[in-house]
Image (tube, rainbow, N blue to C red):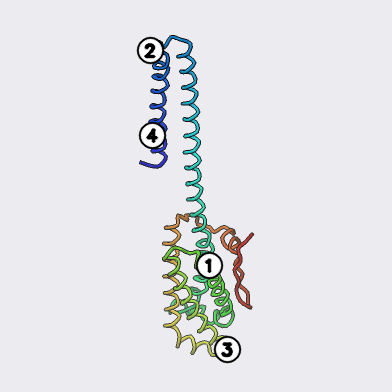
Amino acid sequence: MSAEKWGWASIFAVGVSLLAIAFGLPVVVSGWKPDTHQAVAAWVQAVGSVGAIFTALRIAIKQRHDAERQAQEDAKRRRQEPLRALRVIVERAQYLVVEIPTGPNDDYNVENYFKDVASAEALATAQRALQALPLGRIVDPSAVLCIFEMQDALHIAKQVLEQIEQDRTQWPAIWAKNKYRLGSAKIHATNAQMLMRAALKDAEITDHLMSGSGSASLGIEATGEGSSLSQAA
């Protein structure tokens, strides 16, 4: 039986007991003459006392129930906030890693990508955003594993792109040499995405589009000089 049901059961039991006293006491006090004025006065006073006690118990139980519900909602919100921020970062990082060409089906846009699109700094920005997340506030194991997987993906991909950016004319040789590593980065990114979905499901986050409140509430800033995290006022 829930706490609320136990509370109402207690009120009912107390009410029945007090009503019994209320009806019986005047009879005893008046010498078994319930038609006397004293009996009527005592009965009215007893009924009023029962009503007051009943109301006080009901208010107390409702306040306790409201407080418990509010505490649960607050705990749920504290759990969801960092996950919402993490989801935005993971989606961006996953896109950056997956768009890197790695196989035969990607050959048509390989040259264009490595000459004009590839950006190690974009991957570094995603890395800094991940590092700025408050791990102490992330209680979901799946989310923690997601961070590790995405960090591995970004680290591998960034190393390869940094080599290419040093001399973009050498991209064919560097790309051919690192296809396996880039493929491994994509696997890590895919694993991170799956873990993120599991964490969101466990935390009962069902919205498909992220609101801006997640990152804003955590005060995440990722810049070229480093990352910082501050709690929004």
Mark linked to residue 32? 2
Q: Residues within 10 Å of mark 4 (few under 14, many from 20)?
A: few
Q: Nearer the N terminus, badge 4 or badge 2?
A: 4
Mark linked to residue 166? 3
Question: Can you say which quadrant of the picture contains the N terminus?
Answer: top left
Front position among marks 3 and 2: 2
In this rendering, the answer to whether 98 lies above or below 23 is below
Q: Residues within 10 Å of mark 3 (few under 14, many from 20)?
A: few
Q: Nearer the N terminus, badge 1 or badge 2?
A: 2
Element on which disc 3 rests:
helix
Can you tell which quarter of the image residue 190 is in?
bottom left
Relative to 10, 173 lies left or right: right
Give the residue pinned by disc 4. 9
User: At 41% across and 34% down in the image, what residue appears?
Assistant: 8
Q: Nearer the N terminus, badge 4 or badge 1?
A: 4
Q: CA distance from mark 4 to mark 1?
A: 44 Å
Mark linked to residue 134? 1
Can you tell which quarter of the image residue 176 is in?
bottom left
What's under tag 1, amino acid-wise?
A: Pro
